[in-house]
Amino acid sequence: QVQLVESGGGLAQAGGSLRLSCSASGRDFSSYVVGWFRQAPGKEREIVAAISRTGVSTYYTDSAKGRFTISRDNAKNTVYLQMNSLKPGDTAVYYCAARKLLGISTNRYEYDYWGQGTQVTVSS
């Protein structure tokens, strides 16, 4: 089992940057695929990016490609989401989630562990 805590959210201006961190406690963090999801008011929770257990493979939704970078440091039990060129449409609560031993999935129902979320607000 793993516990996840997000940090790094806040208020940014359009065009600015934020780096989110997802810190994990528990054993064998390197056994988990990790995804970043977001949920805006009145909308479904959607995937933003995901990273394989070793960090070799990554996935980005179209809106994140070229602007966001997901990475992980298994020695620190942490996954990062670097967000550049932020837009007002990126405003949402951002969640990290983990699934053990399997490959990357874009389906939120296939992730077993979730953090509490961190608010990201981008002003125009």
Image (cartoon, grey):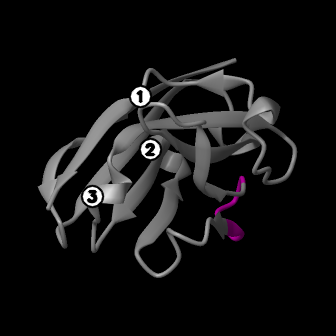
Q: Above or below — where is 94 with respect to 90?
A: above
Q: Which residue type carries mark 2?
A: Lys
Instruction: Please name which of the two marks, 1 or 2, marks the residue nearer to the observer.
Output: 1
Foreground label between 3 and 1:
3
Instruction: Single out the mark in the foreground, 2 or 3.
Output: 3
Cα gap from disc 2 to disc 3, whole angstroms: 31 Å
- Residue marked by disc 3: 88
On the image, which quarter does residue 111 sit in? top right
Q: Quadrant of the C terminus?
A: bottom left
- Residue 70: image x %, image y %? 50, 62
Q: Which residues are magenta?
A: 53-58
Q: Which residue is mark 1?
A: 117
For the residue labelled by badge 2, is the local secondary structure a helix, a strand or a loop?
helix
Sequence-first tag of 2 and 3: 2
Residue 21 horizontal/vertical position (percent): 37, 44
Measured along the vertical axis of the image, is residue 87 above or below residue 20? Answer: below
**Which residue is pictured at 65% across the width and 58% down the height?**
51
CB within 8 Å, label 1 to label 2: no
Please state the total of marks drawn on the protein image: 3
With 26 as the anchor, is 78 left or right in this view?
Answer: left
Quarter of the image containing the N terminus?
A: top right
Q: Is residue 119 magenta?
A: no
